[in-house]
Image (cartoon, rainbow, N blue to C red):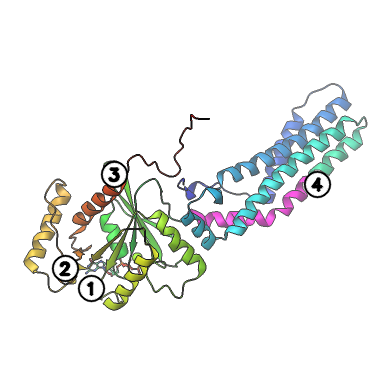
Amino acid sequence: MVSIVWRSIPTVLTVEELLDKAFSKAKKAGDAVVDKDRVYRTRKQMTRMVGSAGDSLSATLLEWVRRWPSLDKMSEFDVAMVEAAVGCDDYRQSLGACQWAAEKCLEISQQNAKKLRRMVNLPPMHEARREAYGRISSIMGRIETNLDFLREARDTLRALPMIDSMEPCLVVAGAPNVGKSALIASMSSGKPEIAAYPFTTRQLHVGHFEHRRMKYQLVDTPGLLDRPMEERNPIEMQAIAALEHVGDLCLFLMDPSETGGASLEEQTNLLNEVAELLPQTPLIVIDGKGDLLEGIDPDEWKEVCSMEHALIENPEGPIPEIRNPETGHMVISSTAPAGIERLRFEIIERIGEMRETNPLVLPENWHVRDDSV
Ligand SMILES: Nc1nc2c(ncn2[C@@H]2O[C@H](COP(=O)(O)OP(=O)(O)OP(=O)(O)O)[C@@H](O)[C@H]2O)c(=O)[nH]1
Ligand SMILES: [Mg+2]
């Protein structure tokens, strides 16, 4: 599946703007006609005007249809986002309406040209042009609500996160307030992007880091994988199911300090649910907010913190690790920061192993030439 660059979907004009643009272009095309014979000249002018209006309208509409991502070519996760954000039925119907109107506009200009060919008097020629303009305007009027929908949808869709399915993707899950966004921020090179999720009113952080020319994407899941699943609506379930195809690895962040508000029992229940929902996605369980954890030797913690700081300066240095003696999970702190570089190393290793398992398997959407036919 090709990743969608939501930000590049083109602007959709209003019907009035479209018609103004097309008719003024058509007028210029008509004015450019030169012919000494008045009948020939008028016939040519009228034909050109309607032809130009029909052509430019249909070209614009078809260009929109081409550049708006097709639902059939989107990843399941993107389809779920479109469904939740603007509705797939309206999306499909509106693009279908543009396609229909484009064909109708061309049809009208062809019919008009045919009619004009047989005319010898000037007034009917002008009348034919007016009639064609009227029909074109009425066709465009019929797709007005569709264009309004696309215009609004564009604003919503442009704010959605972009996930490149060719690059590794890490899904960060965990109860609310456990520090998911802080973890993404501390692992990302540069500031994480703030995106909108149609499943939550909260902001979503999408970050990434690079290693050996591979881009590791970190995707937040507020509103999806952060609360019990019973009260989920079908769209959210669809998105969760689709995360299975998007995520190479799931980082499940626990907050043993419980300062985020969720008890350890609630968090463990959620972890079990997430593991059940994403049975194919390997899980790494991490204990966050390590700086607040009791039971970890403060001296050892201090050493890990200073080694971690040294690693940022010298990435080739030794990578310390600290584990929670109670749970055995890797401990991190996004604020210290500590354990972040160790986690990054672990991610790179795990993804590397997964991708190495069968180097001959090409990504799903790679084109393979079939010489046998
Ligand atoms: N002490 C400490 N506090 C942290 C750490 N990471 C996050 N926090 C704090 O925990 C709170 C929640 O952090 P977020 O990163 O917003 O948590 P979240 O899981 O993204 O929260 P939602 O998006 O609301 O689900 C904030 O007040 C952070 O400052 C950490 O490593 N140590
Ligand atoms: Mg957050």
Q: In the image, is residue 215 part of the stretch drawn in magenta?
A: no
- In the rendered structure, which amino acid carries the disc numbered 3? Glu
Q: Are marks 2 and 1 in contact (CB under 8 Å)?
A: yes
| SS under mark 1 | loop
Please indicate, yes or no, whether residue 347 appears anywhere in the rendered image: yes
- Crowd class of label 4 (few under 14; some 14 to 19; many from 20; radius 10 Å): few
Question: In the rendering, at what x and y percent does residue 270 appear?
Answer: 34, 72
Please state the extent of the stretch shown in magenta in the rendering.
134-158
Where's ligand 2: which quadrant? bottom left
Q: Residue at x 21, y 57 (%)?
A: 340
Q: Which residue is mark 4?
A: 134
Q: Which residue is mark 3?
A: 356
| SS under mark 2 | loop
**Does mark 2 have its CB less than 8 Å from ligand 1?**
no
- In the rendered structure, which amino acid carries the disc numbered 4? Gly
**Label 2, label 4: how many angstroms apart (C-alpha)?**
75 Å
- Crowd class of label 1 (few under 14; some 14 to 19; many from 20; radius 10 Å): many
Q: Residue at x 30, y 46 (%)?
A: 357
Question: In the rendering, at what x and y percent does residue 84 appear?
Answer: 52, 63
**Label 2, label 3: how many angstroms apart (C-alpha)?**
30 Å
Question: In the rendering, at what x and y percent does residue 265 appear?
Answer: 29, 78
**Label 4, label 3: how many angstroms apart (C-alpha)?**
63 Å
**Label 2, label 1: how many angstroms apart (C-alpha)?**
10 Å
Please tell me the numbered disc located at residue 256: 1
Q: Quadrant of residue 250?
A: bottom left
Q: Earlier in the sequence, mark 1 or mark 3?
A: 1
